[in-house]
Each structure stands twice: as structure tokens, then as C-alpha cells.
Amino acid sequence: MAYVAVEADERLEEGPEGLQFKSFLGSNANDGSDNVGTGRGVGNTDRGYLQDRPHQTKDGGGGGFWTTEYYQPYFDVDTKMVLTRCYSTLLPTSTDYLSTHLNPADLYGPFWTLTTLIFALFLSSSLDASIAAYLSAPGAEYDYDFQLLSIAVSIVYAYGLGLPVLLWIALRYLGVGEWNVVEAVAIWGYAMFVWIPVSVLCVIPVPILRWVLVAVAFVQSGYFLVRNVYPILASAEAKATRLIIIAITVLHAGLALSFKVLFFSYYVIDKIGADIPLPGGDEP
């Protein structure tokens, strides 16, 4: 075995520039939270945002979008969190809802909000019709109109799920990437929560009261949508993108009118109070 003598003075004279360091810790040494010296900022994944978090299965492997594990994080909420998000939509001060309440966004609450609304619309309208039929002709059998259930499913899911997805696709095409599709669906889903108590209260056979309840729900949910969607539209470079809020308002008004005509138009024997005639409708 041969040894080579190296003088200490020669190594010291080379200074720090002559020193080289080699890491034997592996490629995972810098995976911690300390990013000093790496030149990287704190990204969305480091902040824990759900939409940028990699989806992993229980065994640590990744899952594709066709697997159940891919969507599991979007349903990882508890009842208290969902109820808090629902009640927060009723507050007129619920601005910037995405950052204050939907961080991260979920699909569990919007799905059950829309599904509960469907059954609330069908049950309230069926209860109205059955009571009216019983008091008008005692002893007569009443057949439930299950076509109203299919109508409720089509309208609610098309508006609460289809519309935000289409809006997200349109904004992506226009180059607006301030939110993702999960956040869009969550905004619309939670905005529909106010219609659930309104559906229950519209069992009361007072036409004016029903119109007032529908108007309150329209204003409240429409205001919530405008306050949370308009900032996204305003972030686009094209100013004309902001006009989409007009189309959203018109569609929302059409939804409210459809609810009133299709589900809240039954009366017990004689109407209590005057009604508001609709254009093209039958005269009382």
C-alpha cells in the first residue's frame, strides 16, 4: 500500500475556491420545508392548497383521474365544516368566499346541497298539491307527479354543476386561470343552499309570501355569486369578459322564476291574497 504525502500549507493556500463538496445524502435531502439556498419560493403545494396537492392512494402511489382515490381529497370534509360553509353563504358579508371558507374547496358539500334541494323542491310541491287536492275533494286519491322530480334533477344539476363547468371552460379559453373547476362548482353548489329553507317555507299557501321568499332567495344567492365570480372575470385582460356577469344574472333570474312556476304554484282551495299574473298565463 502506497501513501502520498500532502503538505497542509499547500491546501490552505488554495483557499475556499479550491474546496469541493460532494453530498452523499441522496436526492431526497432537500425535500423538507427548509428551502434556504435552493432558489425556490413557497409554491401552492407547500401552502397545502388542495388543487395543487398530488393525489396519492393509501399505499403512497398516485392514482389517475379515473380512480376513486383521485377524487377522495375533494370529499375529505366533516359535517361541521360543510354546515359552516353553507351558513356562511347567507351572510351578506361573505366576500372573497374562496380564500376565507373554501380553502381548500370540496365537492361533498355542493353535491349534497344540490341533491337536498332536489328532494326539497319535489317534496314541498308534492305536499302542496296533496293538501290542495285533499281539501278540495275530501276522500279523493292523489297521484304524485314524479315528473316533477325528473324536472328538478335536470334543472338543479344543469345549473349547479353544468353551468360552472361551462363557465370554467370558457374562462380557460379566454386565458383566465384564477380558479379551478372544483372551486367553480363549489361556489355554485353552496350558493344554492338558500333555496332549501325557501322550498320548505313555500308550503305556506300565500302567493305574495311565496313571491317574497323567491325574491329574497334570488337576491341573496345572486349577490353571493356576483361578489365571488365578478373578481375572477375582472382579472381578465379583455374588459368584455366582465359582461359575462350579465348572462349569469339572467340565468339566475330564469332559475328563480322556474322554481316559482313549477314548484311553488299550488294553492289550498282559494288563494289567500292576490297573485302576480304572468305573461301568457291563464287568467284566474
Image: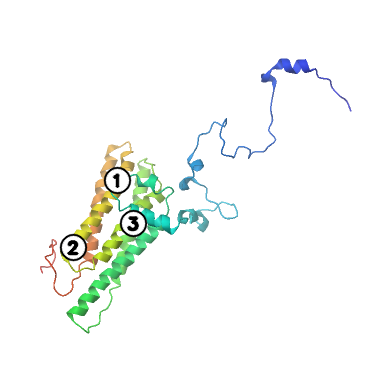
At horizontal 31% and vertical 57% (from top left) the residue drawn is: 192
Inspect the image, locate mark 1, and give the three-letter code of the amino acid beneath it: Arg
Residue 17 image offset from top left, x and y in percent: 66, 19
Measured Cα–Cα span from mark 2 to mark 3: 26 Å
Task: Name which quarter of the figure residue 231 lies in.
Answer: top left
- Choose the circle earlier in sequence order: 1 or 3: 3
Number of other residues with Cα within 10 Å of mark 1, as a class: few under 14, some 14 to 19, many 20 or more: some
Residue 36 image offset from top left, x and y in percent: 56, 32
Asked if residue 244 lies left or right of residue 16, the reply is left
Q: Quadrant of the N terminus?
A: top right
Task: Provide the residue designation for mark 1.
Answer: 227
Q: Quadrant of the C terminus?
A: bottom left
On the question of residue 71 being in view, the answer is yes
Label 2: element kind: helix
Q: Nearer the viewer, mark 1 or mark 3?
A: 1
Residue 5 image offset from top left, x and y in percent: 84, 20
- Choose the circle earlier in sequence order: 2 or 3: 3
Q: Nearer the viewer, mark 2 or mark 3?
A: 2
At horizontal 29% and vertical 41% (from top left) the residue drawn is: 241
- Choose the circle earlier in sequence order: 1 or 2: 2
Number of other residues with Cα within 10 Å of mark 2, as a class: few under 14, some 14 to 19, many 20 or more: some
Inspect the image, locate mark 2, and give the three-letter code of the amino acid beneath it: Leu
Task: Provide the residue designation for mark 2.
Answer: 209
Asked if labels 2 and 1 touch by Cβ distance under 8 angstroms, the answer is no
The circle drawn on residue 23 is none
Inspect the image, locate mark 3, and give the three-letter code of the amino acid beneath it: Gly
Label 1: element kind: helix
Task: Provide the residue designation for mark 3.
Answer: 160
Asked if residue 280 lies left or right of residue 167, the reply is left
